[in-house]
């Protein structure tokens, strides 16, 4: 039996909604007019059985159909499940990085936030109640995921309900990726059918108004990820996202710019045109990390031709910025991977303060060097150039 065929939990659900007889006023007159003088009882579920399986189970249907009732019953029958709800942060004055957990260490908090697209310094220190709806959804997902162990179940009602289409799609894709990577089960209720391709659920519970629920097992294409194409850009593309980078000001110089454009259908929402951008610059002259990994090959003091050798063999990824809507989708790694694959330089490096906590450079194939004497992480990728290995 496949992983998706396994059952990790079962629920048997019966639910009725009782509307009592109105006692007076216009409601009583209206109830008589429509034949409801004695009240009304509606059966939403009658012995409905749901097997919870690894992956995502999506509960879809119109507002008022009974999606939230189903989730409430699941919460009652599975008290150990982790509930996702952005509303928990509506009155939370704690900074986002503190609200994610009661016990996590700083590296654990930063890692969880970066994986859910919240790796922005200003976001981390902002009170949770002041975050945008999309950020609160991501924070709720990060909090639930942090508390989960492999095999646990997450329950999420009104998933991405109040979000604009670009943010809703990005949040759905981030959530689906996290559930798959962590080996979790999740039941999410949403009225937004257009999110199903992003969630790629293993089963879909369809609950129409006034009709019984039906469980469908859809077949999704192997890869539902959007084709994010990397192309050459200009420094104007960097300026579109520069305000979202934790280092103030542009790089001192640039050689090339690479960009991933936002989907055409999203560009009318908030004027977002650039989803992610990376800037490649000449190397800084003095760099302890570079000297350590190259055994002093590029050390400038007392070595003739060192500057010329440095400029001929090394370039630096000086900026990688992803628009907040599209964080957590792997765009930063995609940009870095493209640079490493297409560059003609033997050595590509990056100096990143956030590198201690954000994994995208490593995911793209770069090697980190952490040294107590440096307030940054030095990342490098070394090819074997015609003149020999860069460390020689």
Image: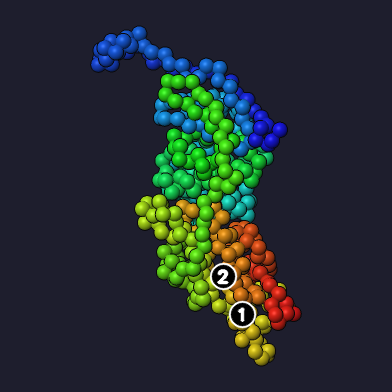
Please determine whether, in this image, residue 67 is positioned above or below residue 286: above
Q: Nearer the viewer, residue 133 or 13?
A: 13
Q: Is residue 206 above or below residue 300?
A: above
Residue 68 visible in the displayed image: no
Q: Please provide percent x and percent y for residue 167.
A: 45, 48
The residue depicted at 60 percent of the width and 72 percent of the height is: 343
Task: Give the number of the mark in front: 2 or 1.
Answer: 2
- Among the two numbered marks 2 and 1 on one chain, the one whose residue lies closer to the N terminus: 1
Measuring from the top left, give residue 324's x and y in whole percent.
47, 55
Q: Is residue 377 visible?
A: yes
Q: Residue furthest right?
A: 392
Q: Residue at x 49, y 48 (%)?
A: 170
Residue 361 picture location, percent across and down: 61, 62
* Quadrant hosting residue 11: top right
- Please give the residue where the numbered disc 2 appears in the rendered image: 317
Residue named by callout 1: 286
Residue at the location (58% across, 47% down)?
223
Q: Residues within 10 Å of mark 1 (few under 14, many from 20)?
A: few
Secondary structure at badge 2 equals strand
Locate the N terminus and report the quarter of the image it occupies. Answer: top right
CB-based contact (under 8 Å), mark 2 and mark 1: no
**Could you give the CA–CA distance between mark 2 and mark 1, rounded to whole angstroms?**
16 Å
Point out the residue furthest to the top here: 38
Work out which quarter of the rendered image holds the C terminus and state it: bottom right
Give 131 or 222, whichever is nearer the viewer. 222
In terms of secondary structure, where does tag 1 sit? Answer: loop
Give me the disc on residue 266. Answer: none
Q: Quadrant of residue 34?
A: top left
Q: Is residue 388 left or right of residue 107?
A: right
- Residue 263 placement (x, y as % from top left): 44, 54
Instruction: Please tell me which residue is depicted at 49% across the width and 28% down the height of the picture.
Output: 206
Q: Nearer the viewer, residue 272 or 150?
A: 272
């Amino acid at each position: 039996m496949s992983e998706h065929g396994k059952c990790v939990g079962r629920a048997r659900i019966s639910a009725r909604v009782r509307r009592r007889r109105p006692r007076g006023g216009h409601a009583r007159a209206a109830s008589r007019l429509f034949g409801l003088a004695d009240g009304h009882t509606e059966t939403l579920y009658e012995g409905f059985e749901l097997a919870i399986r690894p992956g995502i189970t999506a509960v879809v249907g119109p507002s008022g159909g009974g999606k939230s009732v189903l989730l409430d019953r699941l919460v009652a029958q599975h008290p150990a499940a982790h509930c996702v709800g952005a509303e928990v942060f509506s009155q939370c004055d704690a900074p986002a990085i503190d609200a994610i957990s009661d016990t996590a260490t700083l590296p654990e908090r930063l890692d969880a936030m970066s994986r859910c697209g919240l790796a922005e310094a200003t976001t981390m220190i902002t009170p949770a109640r002041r975050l945008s709806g999309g950020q609160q959804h991501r924070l709720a997902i990060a909090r639930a995921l942090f508390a989960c162990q492999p095999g646990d179940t997450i329950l999420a009602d009104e998933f991405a309900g109040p979000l604009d289409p670009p943010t809703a799609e990005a949040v759905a894709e981030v959530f689906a990726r996290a559930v798959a990577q962590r080996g979790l089960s999740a039941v999410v209720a949403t009225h937004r059918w257009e999110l199903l391709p992003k969630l790629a659920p293993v089963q879909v519970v369809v609950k129409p108004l006034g009709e019984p629920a039906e469980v469908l097992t859809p077949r999704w294409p192997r890869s539902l990820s959007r084709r994010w194409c990397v192309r050459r850009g200009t420094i104007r593309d960097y300026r579109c996202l520069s305000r979202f980078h934790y280092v103030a000001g542009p790089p001192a110089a640039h050689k090339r710019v690479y960009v991933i454009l936002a989907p055409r259908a999203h560009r009318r929402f908030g004027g977002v045109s650039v989803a992610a951008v990376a800037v490649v610059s000449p190397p800084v002259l003095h760099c302890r990390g570079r000297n350590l990994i190259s055994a002093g090959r590029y050390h400038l003091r007392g070595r003739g031709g060192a500057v010329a050798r440095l400029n001929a063999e090394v370039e630096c990824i000086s900026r990688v910025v992803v628009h907040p809507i599209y964080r957590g989708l792997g765009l930063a790694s995609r940009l870095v991977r493209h640079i490493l694959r297409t560059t003609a330089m033997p050595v590509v490096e990056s100096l990143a303060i956030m590198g201690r906590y954000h994994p995208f450079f490593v995911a793209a194939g770069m090697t980190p060097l952490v040294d107590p004497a440096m307030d940054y992480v030095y990342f490098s990728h070394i090819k074997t150039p015609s003149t020999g290995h860069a460390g020689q």
